[in-house]
Image: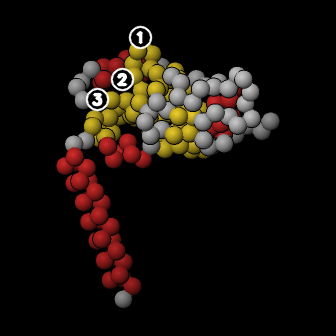
């Protein structure tokens, strides 16, 4: 079998960047069963309600929906089970230290294959307030309008 190379994104959590202020990101391996990997290769996953937590010195991913494999049999996986993340002990300690601050949470940003291995990008994030979200949208809209005006002026 030919070894995969590069990065193939399966699912992204675009809402997380809108709802949270991202402080640090980490790449973690993820423990999956065989049918979960096959379902991911078909691109059938959702990170919308996902979060991660530190429990007894390990990091667990919860709320991530990986659809059941269509050709699976009686040993198919459950769609929203708890999945263990694989990180170095020092990284787990660093994340646990940051999580002790109030208002911090661990959110998954991307689920992808890197050289054939399933990885998840998690971030230590702080929740945005409603006015922060409106301000970010306003800034994005202003930059878009200024770019549009500059491109119209250059075309004349």
Q: What SS does tag 2 mark?
A: helix
Q: Which residue is mark 1?
A: 56
Q: Which residue is mark 2?
A: 95
x then y, percent, for residue 63: 46, 30
User: How far apart in space, not on screen, are marks 2 and 3 (Cα)?
Assistant: 10 Å
Q: What SS does tag 1 mark?
A: loop
Residue at 57 percent across and 34 percent down: it is 66
User: Which quadrant holds residue 149?
Assistant: bottom left
Question: Mark on residue 69?
Answer: none
Mark 3 vs mark 1: which is more N-terminal? 1
Q: Is residue 90 visible?
A: no
Please, which colouring scheme is shown? Answer: secondary structure
Q: Does 117 sit above or below residue 53?
A: below
Residue at 57 percent across and 43 percent down: it is 10
Q: Is residue 100 visible?
A: yes
x then y, percent, for residue 51: 41, 30
Quadrant placement of the C terminus? bottom left
Q: Residues within 10 Å of mark 3 (few under 14, many from 20)?
A: some
Q: Closer to the camera: disc 2 or disc 1?
A: 1
Residue at 25 percent across and 49 percent down: it is 133
In the image, is 139 to the left or to the right of 67? left
Residue sitting at the far top: 56
Residue sitting at the far left: 131
Mark 2 vs mark 3: which is more N-terminal? 2
Q: Are marks 2 and 3 in contact (CB under 8 Å)?
A: no
Q: Which residue is mark 3?
A: 104
Mark 2 vs mark 1: which is more N-terminal? 1
């Amino acid at each position: 079998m030919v070894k995969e190379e590069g990065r193939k994104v399966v699912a992204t959590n675009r809402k997380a960047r809108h709802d949270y202020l991202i402080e640090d990101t980490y790449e973690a391996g993820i423990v999956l069963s065989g049918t979960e990997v096959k379902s991911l290769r078909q691109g059938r996953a959702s990170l919308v309600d996902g979060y991660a937590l530190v429990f007894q010195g390990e990091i667990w991913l919860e709320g991530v929906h990986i659809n059941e494999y269509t050709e699976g049999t009686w040993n198919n996986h459950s769609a929203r089970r708890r999945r263990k993340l694989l990180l170095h002990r020092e990284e787990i300690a660093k994340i646990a230290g940051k999580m002790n601050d109030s208002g911090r949470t661990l959110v998954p940003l991307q689920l992808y294959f890197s050289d054939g291995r399933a990885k998840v990008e998690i971030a230590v994030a702080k929740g945005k307030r409603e006015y922060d979200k409106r301000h970010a949208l306003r800034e994005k809209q202003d930059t878009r309008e200024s770019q549009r005006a500059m491109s119209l002026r250059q075309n004349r």
